Amino acid sequence: MDQGTSKQFRKVGLSVNLISATEWLIIIIAFLGRYMLQFYQTAIGYTAGFFGLNTTQVGIAFALFGVAFGLAAFIVHKISPSKFRGTVAISLVILGGTMPLYLVVHGAFEIYTLMALDGLITGIYMDALMSMGGMASKDPKQRQIDQSAFSFWVSTALIIAPFTTGVLLSVLNIKYMFALFAIMALIALPFLFLLRGKHSLQYVGHRSETEDGTAPSALKFLFLNKNKIFNASLIAALGNKIPYFIVLSFGVLYGKVLGLTPQQIFYLIAVMFAFNVGARLFVMLKSPINNKLRYMEIAMIFAAGAAIMLPLSVIWHPLFYIVFPLAGIPEGILWPIGLQIANTTFKSHEIGSSTAFFSSGMMIMAALMPVLGWIISTIGFGISFWLFGGLVIVFFVWLMLYVKINKSEFTQVQSPTVLIKEPKPTNS
């Protein structure tokens, strides 16, 4: 095998010499956690409708889960990296106990409560796992490759979850599926226990500002940080989430208007995530990447395409099928790119916070879904999709202007091995 081919295989993670056993353990745990998250996201719209909620209430349910997931970053921000393993264990146990409660809940309030609680718990363990995904090594360049492999292999759950949901929905009530998939939380616990001894996480410096009480507040870290490329990745991530969330929250309802069954929509969502995973694989094979800004801009072009195709599909229905790959590709590009930036352009004690805020920040856009649900119930799908499509274009323009204004600063942080240097400790 020639050197170039060998290098590509190593990037896919087939060489244990490059992707360590520790990283594989983290990937297995995160895959199981991501599967539960993706099942939840895929099934929220259908589940809310199953319990008799209208379009506005479906949007509220999706928003509660997404916003609670986003707020988890403010909790993870205060947790020392050395406590992540225990945090994930507790979260998985709680989620394994709450998901089966869909067997007994009745009414909107109980549905809202469960979705908000599980959104918060899911956000906590996924934010912690996203940070752990780069903790198998202390080397910045290696962490980019680890994060790309982590992002790709974990993302395979994106395809499997909606596909199995569609298959099982023909034989199982949705309530029983929540109970069934809750078992994955318990399966993940033994692998989490193995992250000790020679497979312990590498914290890139064991001292933490969180531990000594000098960490900046979450709001200060999120809104006043001077990491321009991180801020650009957040702008792109927020914009691309709009068509992505529309498909997940209202895809089943809109599909019924077009004559599609819920199972068919779940299969289309699986197609969306197949393109998502393909994009992640492409990023992984290209990692470490120098010009990340170019990838952000390309991702937003795809997101804008999805946002335009949605309202046009009201006029010509076959365009709805094109929305799914167009909505999946940008998230597949921006997720690994954003995690690489969060994991390699901050000081070591800030990596947990940067990763958590990027991961959870993307979910905040779910707060717009109740507004969209109300608009749909008032004026229909067509104009509603045009309004939110315009919002995606606004984010695209914002990204381009932000890049143009800060162009000189971006050129200083595009190295694939850049990591903010730690100040040398002084003897006391």
Image (cartoon, rainbow, N blue to C red):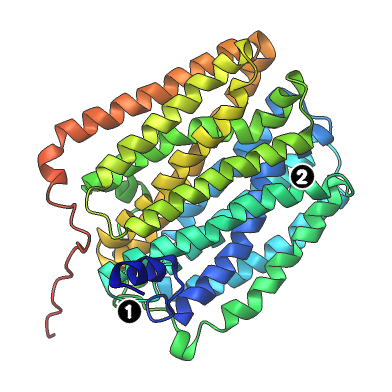
Quadrant of residue 370 within the rendered picture: top right
Residue type beneath disc 2: Gly
Q: Which residue is mark 2?
A: 166
Q: Position of residue 200 (x, y in %)?
A: 45, 83
Q: Which mark is residue 43?
A: none
Residue 251 placement, left or right of 183: left
| For marks 1 and 2 on the same chain, the one whose residue lies earlier in the sequence | 2
| Mark 2 crowd level (few <14, some 14–19, many ≥20, 10 Å Cα) | many
Q: Secondary structure at mark 2?
A: helix
Residue under the point 29% across and 27% down: 398
What residue is rendered at 64% in x and 80% in y? 190
Distance from Cα at disc 1 to Cα at disc 2: 45 Å
Q: Nearer the viewer, mark 1 or mark 2?
A: 2
- Nearer to us in this view, 205 or 210: 205
Mark 1 residue type: His
Q: Quadrant of the C terminus?
A: bottom left
Residue sitting at the far front:
1
Query: Where's residue 316, x and y in %?
Result: 62, 13
Q: Position of residue 384 (x, y in %)?
A: 57, 15
**Residue with the mark numbered 1:** 206
Secondary structure, mark 1, is loop
Q: Is residue 21 left or right of residue 427?
A: right
- Where residue 112 sits: x, y (%)? 71, 40
Q: Are marks 1 and 2 in contact (CB under 8 Å)?
A: no
The residue that appears at 53% across and 76% down in the rendered structure is 25
Q: Which of 264/119 is in front?
A: 264
